[in-house]
Amino acid sequence: MVFNTELVGSTVEMLVLKLLSERQMYGYEIIQVVNERTDGEFNWKEGTLYPLLHRLEGAGYLATEWQTGDTGKKRKYYRLTTKGTARAESKVAEWGRFAGSVNAVLFQPAR
């Protein structure tokens, strides 16, 4: 099943911030985690992620550090700043309120 791109697009920032609240990751790792956790329903590509990472970094939500991985390859790791942590918490809370409201309309029986 392919989801509406507008629906998915509105959640990408929140999902990336949430993942980075768990641990620092490099870009391709973020893509892999999203694709794995959604059983392939979200099939993110680099073109979806990297412009967002650059925007979040520019806004001060992310800090970066180059590290050498197990394979010897240098990777740019992203982690949340204090400002990014607050943004992640805000976005997740907003999503919870939004999803709860949508579910109330969709799944509560008519009175």
Image (cartoon, rainbow, N blue to C red):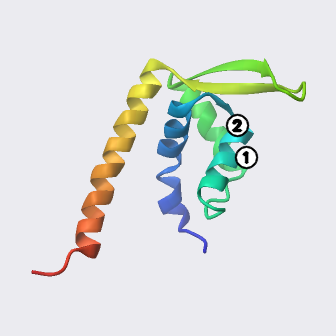
Q: Which residue is mark 2?
A: 27
Extreme-bottom residue of the structure? 110
Q: Is residue 94 left or right of residue 35?
A: left
Q: Is residue 92 left or right of residue 22?
A: left
Q: Is residue 100 left or right of residue 79?
A: left
**Residue 71 quadrant:** top right
Residue 67 percent coordinates (x, y): 77, 19
**Residue 103 quadrant:** bottom left
Amino acid type at image mark 1: Glu
Residue 72 percent coordinates (x, y): 90, 24
Label tally: 2
Q: Label 2 to label 1, Cα distance in Å?
A: 8 Å
Residue 79 percent coordinates (x, y): 58, 25
Earlier-in-chain disc, 2 versus 1: 2
Q: Which residue is mark 1?
A: 46
- Nearer-the-camera pick, 80 or 57: 80
Identified at 52% across, 58% down, the residue is 8
The answer to whether marks 2 and 1 mark residues whose Cβ atoms lie closer than 8 Å is yes
Q: Is residue 107 placed above or below 16 in the rendered structure?
A: below
Identified at 53% across, 48% down, the residue is 12
Q: Looking at the figure, which quarter contains the C terminus? A: bottom left
Mark 1 lies on a secondary structure that is: helix
Identified at 71% across, 52% down, the residue is 45
Identified at 60% across, 74% down, the residue is 1
Amino acid type at image mark 2: Gly
Extreme-left residue of the structure? 111
Q: Is residue 36 left or right of residue 111?
A: right
Mark 2 lies on a secondary structure that is: helix
